[in-house]
Image (tube, rainbow, N blue to C red):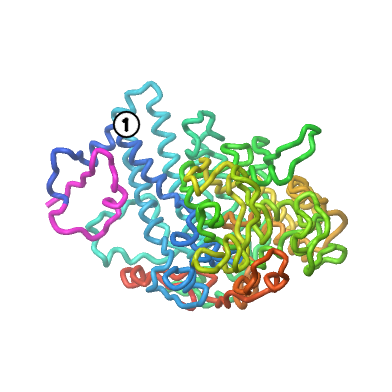
């Protein structure tokens, strides 16, 4: 009997219904009075738009880094302080996971989105109600392009996590397809990149450059497609995927390498060109706040990139996200928070000094011991010297022992992360194991204790990243190009630190660009993917991880015992961890699907 697929008028759960291969016999045979058929969905405007909205909902909400996403807690920049037994990042960092663990597996999530997008593209063209409108065909073309963009973005998300994936094309596999016909092998990484890039280009041609109607903010645009393409091509040019001979035996059943064994310098040029194309739009700007004399206020500027809604630096945002959940997890206990996200000492050490030098660079002025005796622009006398005279982005991003909490409506309160401090470990689980918290993306007018939060979109792609993408790609294929320093220095100027000057070798500039990304893009879900694509995660993401000595019996801010570097966790990173394991259930179901190396 031919199945009749139906959904509720609200179309809730449609993506799930349409992407389930195995269904109980006759489950779809009945159509209750309060439901409509899928054919009716694509003859009505509202229902079709709701279907498209469900595809947009597949864009993951990545603020939840404690139970829903691993990108911060598994990278070297942060510790999910609740990540003890029972939290999956804990097991991953100990190396205790495998393809059956199910930890942060997004394979099925994104393929469901891909299938729904393709189904939408196949059926939206015949929507009778939309076609009756004066601009009906234009509206259908726009919706079709939006779904095409979303499908390409979902493929990119799979690619960054799993490496080469299966490209399904424009055909929707029927739910009753025999399993023997579902034996589909992985495409090569380069095939995936070429396909995604071409899909983004095609979708972008039919989309507006930006949304000019405030009610449409967050919907797909050409600039969003360009930003995804620029990041895609940067990843594709990077050492993990570009001539990585460690993957020589990573082949399909026919012996074709799934990751190219030949280094191609031109991939860096393609990445640079894609980033420069966004810059040349001359539409986006670095977000800046200036004082009455026109001078850049670096902390307000850097913080405002993610706090000020719809500013000109933001390219691709998720309009709705649980910002209150992020702020509650990141905030100290006295502020109504859970002290749940701690910066690592590695991340603290990455920030430059006020003079723009790295802490281990000659002439930096870095001092690790003792306490300051005078106020500075950002610190008060009595601050531990490790935190004195650091660059503004440090103070905009890191909460350290003795710093003042960002919410000032209940007075100036110093954050005490020592054992007997106001958010220390004594008598509670809600404390930072590293002795640090994260200030970035915490709105000063929010107050978790009062359950008051300032809403804003979640920033996923922004111009500052594009500048750094461009500089990195240029340095790899055209070292010495003056644009490298130009765009790095635009970032540093906004950050309130001196520009880089002089000449640098390609290797020196590579190291500086990598550190600049670690600082500028901190806690924005970049570091995890950067260390892996650069093939440095064996050095950065494994071994002992340090913070401050939070367990010392300290009751005062000026007790030096707290400020002793202390290992809070020893992490395990192995070669196989460069790519996420494909769920074993998928391997079992599709015998043509090759598992990632080492799993």
* Residue 471 in the image: above or below residue 533: above
Q: Position of residue 287 (x, y in %)?
A: 67, 40
Q: Where is residue 333 in the image (x, y as percent from the top left)?
A: 53, 57
**Magenta region, residue range:** 1-27
Q: Where is residue 369 in the image (x, y as percent from the top left)?
A: 78, 69
Frontmost residue, 132 versus 297: 297
- In the image, residue 7 lies in the stretch drawn in magenta: yes
User: Is residue 195 among the parts visible in the rendering?
Assistant: no
* Residue 13 in the image: above or below residue 257: above
The residue under the point 42% across, 58% down is 167
* Badge 1 element: helix
Frontmost residue, 522 versus 517: 522
Residue pointed to by mark 1: 45
Give the tally of numbered discs. 1
- In the image, residue 18 lies in the stretch drawn in magenta: yes
Q: Name the side, left or right, on which 501 lies relative to 143.
A: right
Q: Name the side, left or right, on which 424 lies relative to 203.
A: right
Q: Where is residue 313 in the image (x, y as percent from the top left)?
A: 63, 41
Q: Quadrant of the C terminus?
A: bottom left
Quarter occupied by residue 537: bottom right
For label 1, count other residues whose C-alpha is less than 10 Å away and answer few (under 14), some (14-19) or many (20+). Answer: some
Q: Name the side, left or right, on which 300 lies relative to 493.
A: left
């Amino acid at each position: 009997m031919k199945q009749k697929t139906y959904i509720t008028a609200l179309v809730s759960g449609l993506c799930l219904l349409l992407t389930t291969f195995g269904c109980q016999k006759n489950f779809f045979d009945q159509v209750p009075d309060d439901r409509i058929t899928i054919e009716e969905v694509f003859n009505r405007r509202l229902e079709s738009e709701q279907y498209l909205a469900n595809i947009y909902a597949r864009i993951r909400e990545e603020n939840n880094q404690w139970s829903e996403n691993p990108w911060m807690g598994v990278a070297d920049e942060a510790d999910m302080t609740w990540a003890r037994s029972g939290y999956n990042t804990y097991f991953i960092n100990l190396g205790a996971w495998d393809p059956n663990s199910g930890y942060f597996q997004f394979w099925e999530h994104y393929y469901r989105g891909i299938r729904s997008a393709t189904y939408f593209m196949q059926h939206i063209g015949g929507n009778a109600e939309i076609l009756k409108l004066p601009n009906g065909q234009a509206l259908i073309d726009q919706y079709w392009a939006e779904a095409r963009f979303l499908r390409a973005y979902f493929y990119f998300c799979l690619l960054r996590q799993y490496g080469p994936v299966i490209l399904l094309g424009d055909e929707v596999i029927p739910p009753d397809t025999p399993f023997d016909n579902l034996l589909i092998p992985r495409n090569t990484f380069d095939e995936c990149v070429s396909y995604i890039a071409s899909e983004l280009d095609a979708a972008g041609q039919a989309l507006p450059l930006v949304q000019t109607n405030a009610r449409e903010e967050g919907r797909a645009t050409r600039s969003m497609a360009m930003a995804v393409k620029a990041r895609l091509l940067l990843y594709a040019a990077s050492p993990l995927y570009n001539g990585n001979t460690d993957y020589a035996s990573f082949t399909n059943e026919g012996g074709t390498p799934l990751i190219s064994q030949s280094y191609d310098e031109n991939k860096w040029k393609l990445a640079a060109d894609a980033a420069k194309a966004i810059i040349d739009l001359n539409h986006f700007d670095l977000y800046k706040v200036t004082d009455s004399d026109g001078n850049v206020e670096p902390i307000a500027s850097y913080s405002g990139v993610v706090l000020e809604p719809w500013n000109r630096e933001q390219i691709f945002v998720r309009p709705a996200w649980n910002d209150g959940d992020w702020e509650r997890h990141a905030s100290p206990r006295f502020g109504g928070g859970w002290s749940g996200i701690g910066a690592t000492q590695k991340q603290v050490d990455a920030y430059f000094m006020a003079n723009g030098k790295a802490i281990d660079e000659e002439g930096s002025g870095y001092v690790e011991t003792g306490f300051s005796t005078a106020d500075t622009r950002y610190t008060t006398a009595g601050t531990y010297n490790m935190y004195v005279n650091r660059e503004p982005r440090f103070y905009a991003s890191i909460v350290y022992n003795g710093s003042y909490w960002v919410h000032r409506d209940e007075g100036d309160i110093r954050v005490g992360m020592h054992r007997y401090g106001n958010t220390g470990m004594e008598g509670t689980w809600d404390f930072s194991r590293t002795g640090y918290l994260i200030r970035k993306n915490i709105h000063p007018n929010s107050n978790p204790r009062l359950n008051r939060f300032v809403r804003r979109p979640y920033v996923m792609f922004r111009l500052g990243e594009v500048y750094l993408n461009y500089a990195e790609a240029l340095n790899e294929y055209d070292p010495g190009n003056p644009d490298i320093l130009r765009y790095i220095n635009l970032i540093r100027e906004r950050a309130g630190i001196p520009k880089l000057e002089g000449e640098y070798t390609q290797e020196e500039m590579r190291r500086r660009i990598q550190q600049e990304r670690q600082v500028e893009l901190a806690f924005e879900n970049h570091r995890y993917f950067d260390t892996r694509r650069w093939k440095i995660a064996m050095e950065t993401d494994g071994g002992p991880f340090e913070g401050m000595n939070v367990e010392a019996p300290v009751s005062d801010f000026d007790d030096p015992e707290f400020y002793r570097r202390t290992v809070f966790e020893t992490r395990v990173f192995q070669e196989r961890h460069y790519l996420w394991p494909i769920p074993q259930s998928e391997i079992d179901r599709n015998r043509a699907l090759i598992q990632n190396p080492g799993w």
